[in-house]
Amino acid sequence: MTAPALPVQAPVPGPAPKPAAGKVVLEVEDLRVHYLTRFGAKIQAVDGVTFSLKQGEILGIAGESGCGKTTLVSGCMGLYIPPLYHTSGDVRIDGQSIVGMTPEQNRKEVLGRKIAMIPQGALNSLNPTRKIKDMATDMILSHDESADKKTINDRLRERFSRIGLDAQKVLNSYPVELPAGTKQRCVIGISTLLNPKVVVADEPTSALDVSTQKSVIRLLFELMNQEIISSMLFITHELPLLRHVSSSIAVMYAGEFVEYGSTEQVIFDGRQPYSRALMGSMLSTEPGQKSRKPVAIEGAPPKLDKPIPGCRFAERCPVAQPDCRSTDQVLRVVGGRQVRCKYADTDLVKQVGGTV
Ligand SMILES: Nc1ncnc2c1ncn2[C@@H]1O[C@H](COP(=O)(O)OP(=O)(O)OP(=O)(O)O)[C@@H](O)[C@H]1O
Ligand SMILES: [Mg+2]
């Protein structure tokens, strides 16, 4: 799978990362993850997700609020903090299964080094009472006890300069003294200090203005091009944004992947009504293109505390057929991508939403 080719007037300036080299770094196999509520209800927030991520690949995961993106990310990192529990399935990073690891083993062997997260709401993840250099030092020592304490300051200065920051000034600042874009760079810089193979960026641009969004995405590209990180899961609810970010896309709905293919396939020729409705519900901000009116998706995603018969999107799907509500949908290959819709290869789905 190749990295996205950025168009001349791309809203996100490149250079985009090099094409994927082929070696699989993250494998997720039929993963199921649930929450247990205080009342004993089981919320199956991730329900049978399978994918793999290659070196050099950026996989975008898109879907509305509550569809399970962050829960999937927690499962990929082995971060099971009650009420979140692993139900079944496997996650392998660099060939090593992380399922069943103790939190301590996970922290020492996996987190930070093999897989690291840029958290949702990253700006609030910085401790306001501590200087950036103290938080960065903690990050290194908590995941790498053998790190040479004498050289940590030099390491930090080198890395922060490399990501375009005035290292001396920024490292000695408290978060409140820094503008939003710089803080975001600090969070990304700290998260990637140990050169993790996989970075999970959970809505890294959602609270930012457009120009800061662009600089954050540019920084993530730079980190890949400099081989500080080798591949990325980029989580967003803005499917159209992925056109300029990811090489492949998975659209998630009610805990499942409903479409999974190349960026071209999903953005320009979506075959699942939900993917198309999600595209159509966002403003198109392409330069030189007449903006079309976004169309909201009526209703809300289903509750996940009991099994949902048939297609999970059927209740909201504008082209649902009577049998959609009764027939369970499986992922199958249509037009070169995986899609979960009985009518994916008919003209019916083309009546829904829109592409770019
Ligand atoms: N602590 C919890 N206890 C019970 N259910 C939870 C808990 N956290 C999340 N959920 C449920 O799990 C489902 C998936 O939530 P998740 O946060 O993974 O969605 P998301 O796609 O990341 O949403 P967003 O775009 O808002 O970040 C939702 O139905 C949510 O209500
Ligand atoms: Mg989330």
Image (cartoon, rainbow, N blue to C red):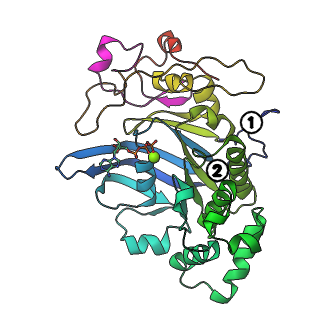
Query: How far apart are the two marked residues, 2 and 1, measured between alpha carbons?
Result: 28 Å
State the quadrant of the N terminus.
top right
Asked if residue 271 shows in the view, the reply is no
- Do the CB atoms of the residues marked 2 and 1 lie less than 8 Å apart? no
Q: In which quarter of the image is residue 48?
A: top left
Foreground pick, 173 / 337: 173
Q: What stretch is highlighted in magenta?
A: 315-340
Q: Does the magenta run of residues contain 337?
A: yes
Residue 198 horizontal/vertical position (percent) = 58, 58
Q: Dot 1 corresponds to which residue?
A: 11
Tell me: residue 334, above or below residue 118: above
Foreground pick, 325 / 354: 354
Q: Which residue is drawn at 78% across and 33% down?
A: 7
Label 2 Cα neighbours within 10 Å, binned few <14 / some 14-19 / many ≥20: few
Total numbered circles = 2
Q: Dot 2 corresponds to which residue?
A: 22
Q: Which amino acid does label 1 sit on?
A: Pro
Whether residue 205 sits left or right of residue 72 in the image: it is right
Tell me: residue 41, above or below residue 298: below
Splitting the image into four quadrants, where does ligand 1 fall?
top left
